Image (cartoon, grey):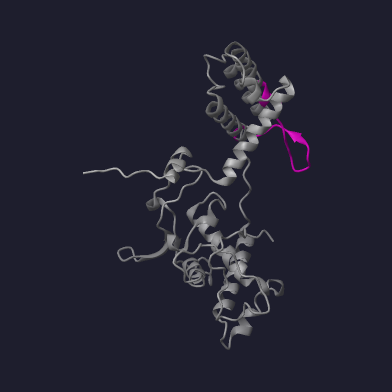
Amino acid sequence: MPFNLSLTEQDVVVLEEGGGLKPNTIADKKRIFNNFDVYVEGNLGQSIETLMSCNENERKENEKKLGDLFSTYFYSLRIKDKDGNPQWPKKGYADRIKSNIKTAVLESYGIDLTDAGKFPNHSKKWKAYIAKLVDQGRSETEHHPEVDPNTMESIYELLINVKEALESRGQDCFDEKLSKVPLKHLNRLHYILQWGAQLLLILFEARRGGENLEFLKKEDMAIIEDPIKTFKFIRRIKTEADKNHTFGTDSRNYGCIPFMQFTDRFNLGEYFEFYLSLLPDEIVIYLFPKPRQINRRWNILDNTYCMYEAKMKGTVPISTD
């Protein structure tokens, strides 16, 4: 028989947060709403809070004014390009701004600014705005071109050289292996090793760039061998919430990093397995913890010390150098 436990105060907070939003998401939503609030105050001389803090008759009139401004807000909205020049936003970005403002006003004041009954002109004005974005060529997202194959081969060559240098620490062949790594990278071998592991995870899981990498745990990954298909691979075995799956993903549908030769010397699974072997032996450890800083007490060439901070969340992005 099912039964109920008494909820704690923290349980109630989590429920009211709707599953909990990340601090960056909360800050972004607040910034978007504040921008709209500044626009309203600049046009009406009052903030949204002041407009809604009045008697019933005045509030109805103010709601109409707010709805009209919500429609015109987007047509006047611009963003800056790389050179600082104003340009129309992309449609996807405009949709996100609209959704955030609508949700914030609805939660705080009980007004749905997209309600066709209350604001019949909104839909017409929004369609005109979208048509303008299409005319300006801002309806589609321009993706970065794929990396040149020769560049990718160079990246893989650097990664395998770094791996072999770290593997050979304390051995007679160490100097020979280390000589294959460019001099400028000698104090950052553990950084490059981690960037390579991030790169493989992003590529073979088809992830949304670096999203959520800093929250993954070492225990989330498992080395799996399929005896029937004689296939060995590394895969994430725990669910993860992201922007497209706010309630978590199905771990059975994740991609995997296969133990496969990608070049003559570079085996994907062996590289990632070696990276995992260098992470601290803690009960809970981040998959990409912060790399240790080189100092007098620790030399990266000394294989008796851990190269990553045991309890510090990863903050180092993939290098573009």
Q: Residue at x 62, y 60 (%)?
A: 316
Q: In the picture provided, is 104 more to the left or to the right than 78?
A: left
Q: Which residue occupies the foreground of this view, 308 or 258?
A: 308
Q: Residue at x 61, y 42 (%)?
A: 27
Residue 138 shows in the view? no
* Residue 151 pos. (x, y %): 64, 61
Q: In the picture provided, is 21 more to the left or to the right than 247?
A: right
Residue 194 shows in the view? yes
Q: Quadrant of residue 9?
A: top left
In the image, residue 137 lies in the stretch drawn in magenta: no
Q: Residue at x 57, y 32 (%)?
A: 100
* Residue 82 pos. (x, y %): 75, 43
Quarter holding the N terminus is top left
Q: In the picture provided, is 70 more to the left or to the right than 267?
A: right
* Residue 124 pos. (x, y %): 59, 17
Q: Which residue occupies the foreground of this view, 48 or 86?
A: 48
Number of marks present in the image shown: 0
In the image, residue 85 lies in the stretch drawn in magenta: yes
Residue 259, placed above or below residue 250? below
Which residue appears farthest toward the bottom when viewing the image? 172
Q: Which residue occupies the foreground of this view, 233 or 318?
A: 318
Quarter holding the C terminus is bottom right
Which residue appears farthest toward the top when viewing the image? 57
Q: Which residue occupies the foreground of this view, 64 or 288?
A: 64
Magenta segment: 72-92
Q: Quadrant of residue 194?
A: bottom right
Residue 265, placed above or below residue 55? below
* Residue 175 pos. (x, y %): 63, 84
Which residue appears farthest toward the left when viewing the image? 1
